[in-house]
Structure formats: structure tokens, C-alpha cells
Image (tube, coloured by chain):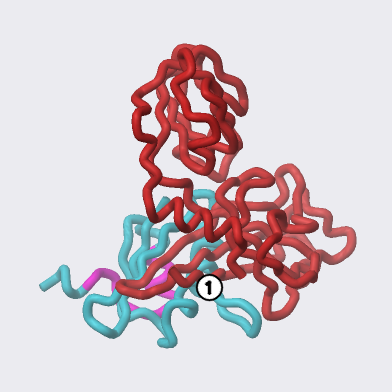
């Protein structure tokens, strides 16, 4: 099921969301989740869901989760060479940055044991599996499209490892797709699996494909 | 991200897959080929055919592994003409 927030995301991705009037900015401060422009160059809350790209000390990007007229807040700073890996940065205090036209896509998938029905107004995946270094946590997935098809797919392969809580079996019942590797992010789809999948040991795997009609 | 192309029997119809760098080769192959009663991988989600007509891409090890798995040739025949 596509979430209500997913409808908004769909619009934003397709329309492009050009940040009209914003040029390249020079940072005056940056943290693990923020970057501050020079003066007040931004329109408050106008860029939520877009990417900000910074270059200088590090080359990095983040998904904008909020912005004031001077400060942009991101989910984290991604390494473009390893978006599924650890966060990098933050950018340097005088690095250049800009807001990228177009909304951030939705290539991340998360799992839960929760069996509740998907509801369009849901904004979080209840009971999302988490755990530092675990194999069953939210991840960047494979995405695929066939020539001229009206659909695309997002496929995740999750491999349980020693950091997963496998003391009792993990019974995966539902997945969610997101625009961020970190919680919360915007949940685009929430889908119950056709049947639950039980993982009991390190090395157990689950492959899930979400088919999306465009 | 490695990019893999899976050819359909209809000329010009191709499934293009962008694969996470973080996946192991085994996970990448499984992501494409997986199929059981409950869930399927990329190929089955995009085609009812048992296997692609051909496979190609920018990751030689993954392309070779998929060609072996599906017993299909490597390379888009349209680009060999």
C-alpha cells in the first residue's frame, strides 16, 4: 500500500522541485545533521525531501528533513561511494553546498515482525527491526525497471548476522520502503508479506520484492 | 552500484537492475534469481519466463554468475550485430 506521504513524495519526485533562486552556498557551520548557509538564503521548510550536496572537506549529500531560512537539517551525511555504509562528514565550515533539484528517491527497505494491516496514514513501520551492524535492518536495495513497463521493483536481500537478535526466531511479516537509511524518513510503501518468513540462525536470508506501479 | 541488464525474448525489452555495492556476490545473485512460494527476486518479478535470453552488465563476476545460473549467453545480441 502506498502511504499518503508516498503520494506527496511521488509528486515531488516527478515534478522536479527546482530550488528557484538558490545558488551555490558557502557554509558557515555544519554538524552531523545540519549545514548553515551565509545569511538567510532559504525559504523556510521549502526543501524538505530534497538532497543537499556539499563539496570541499568531503563530498557528501543528505536528505533534507527540515530547513529554516538559514539552516538545513538532514537525515545524515552519506558517502556517495557507499550509501549503505557509515555516515561521513560533516562538511567543513566553509564548504560549498547546494540544494539539488528533484526529491530524494525511495530506495531503502526495512523489515518488521508486526502483523498489523497497512494503513495509508501510517508514517512509521511499527516494530521496525533495528540494531547496530545487524543484517536485518533498513538497507539500500536493488531497483529495477523493464523497458516501457508501468512498474518498477525494489528488491532487498537481508542476511541475518551475529548482531541480529536471533535468540528467538525473527518472524518477518511486513516491509516498508523509505527515502532515508535512518529512521524515521518518509515511508512510501507498507506491505504485508504473502506469508511470514522465519529466520533463526546467522546466515539465514530473506529476499523481498516490492513492485511499484508508476 | 553495479548495473545489470537482463534480456527478454521480445527484442529490445530489457530489465535493468541497479545492485547495491554492499551486497556480496551471493546476495547479488540471489537478489536476481530468488524464487519461492512467498517471495521472488528481480527476474521473476519482471518476467514469467524461466530465464533471461541473455545477461550483460558492468560487473563481470556477477554477469558470469547469472549467465551460469540461467544457462544463458553473455551480451546483448543487438549490440553484436
Residue A142 versus residue A184: which sits nearer the camera?
A184
Residue extent of the magenta highlight: B63-76
Q: Is residue B27 left or right of residue A170?
A: left
Vertical order, A201 against B23 (above or below): below
Q: Residues within 10 Å of mark 1 (few under 14, many from 20)?
A: many
Q: Quadrant of the rendered structure where residue B54 is?
A: bottom left
Q: Residue A152 appears at what percent x and percent y?
A: 44, 68
Q: Residue at x 40, y 28 (%)?
A: A98
Q: Quadrant of residue A110?
A: bottom right
Say whether residue A43 is left or right of residue A172: left
Quick one: quadrant of the N terminus of chain A?
bottom right
Color of chain A here? Answer: red
Q: Is residue B71 magenta?
A: yes
Position above or below: A133 against B15: above
Task: Looking at the picture, tell me which residue is in the foreground, A118 or A159.
Answer: A118
* Chain B pictured colour: cyan
Residue A117 location (% of width, % of height):
75, 72
Residue highlighted by disc 1: B41
Amino acid at each position: 500500500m502506498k502511504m499518503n506521504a508516498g503520494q506527496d513524495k511521488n509528486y515531488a519526485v516527478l515534478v522536479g522541485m527546482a530550488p528557484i533562486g538558490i545558488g551555490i552556498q558557502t557554509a558557515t557551520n555544519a554538524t552531523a545533521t545540519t549545514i548553515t548557509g551565509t545569511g538567510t538564503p532559504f525559504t523556510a521548510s521549502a526543501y524538505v525531501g530534497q538532497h543537499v550536496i556539499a563539496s570541499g572537506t568531503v563530498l557528501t549529500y543528505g536528505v533534507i528533513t527540515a530547513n529554516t531560512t538559514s539552516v538545513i537539517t538532514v537525515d545524515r551525511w552519506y558517502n556517495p561511494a557507499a550509501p549503505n555504509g557509515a555516515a561521513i562528514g560533516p562538511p567543513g565550515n566553509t564548504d560549498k553546498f547546494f540544494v539539488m533539484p528533484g526529491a530524494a528517491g525511495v530506495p531503502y527497505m526495512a523489515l518488521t515482525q508486526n502483523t498489523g494491516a497497512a494503513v495509508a496514514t501510517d508514517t512509521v513501520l511499527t516494530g521496525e527491526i533495528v540494531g547496530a551492524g545487524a543484517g536485518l535492518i533498513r538497507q539500500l536495495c536493488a531497483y529495477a525497471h523493464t523497458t516501457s513497463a508501468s512498474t518498477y521493483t525494489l528488491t532487498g536481500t537481508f542476511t541475518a548476522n551475529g548482531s541480529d537478535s536471533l535468540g528467538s526466531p525473527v518472524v518477518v511479516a511486513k516491509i516498508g520502503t523509505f527515502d532515508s537509511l535512518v529512521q524515521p524518513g518518509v515511508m512510501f510503501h507498507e506491505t504485508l508479506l504473502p506469508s511470514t518468513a522465519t529466520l533463526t540462525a546467522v546466515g539465514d536470508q530473506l529476499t523481498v520484492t516490492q513492485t511499484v506501479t508508476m | 552500484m553495479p548495473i545489470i541488464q537482463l534480456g527478454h525474448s521480445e527484442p529490445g525489452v530489457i530489465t535493468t537492475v541497479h545492485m547495491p555495492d554492499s551486497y556480496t556476490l551471493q546476495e547479488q545473485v540471489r537478489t536476481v534469481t530468488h524464487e519461492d512460494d512467498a517471495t521472488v527476486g528481480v527476474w521473476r518479478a519482471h518476467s514469467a519466463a524461466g530465464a533471461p535470453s541473455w545477461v550483460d552488465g558492468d560487473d563481470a563476476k556477477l554477469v558470469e554468475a547469472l549467465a551460469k545460473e540461467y544457462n544463458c549467453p553473455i551480451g546483448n545480441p543487438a549490440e553484436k550485430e
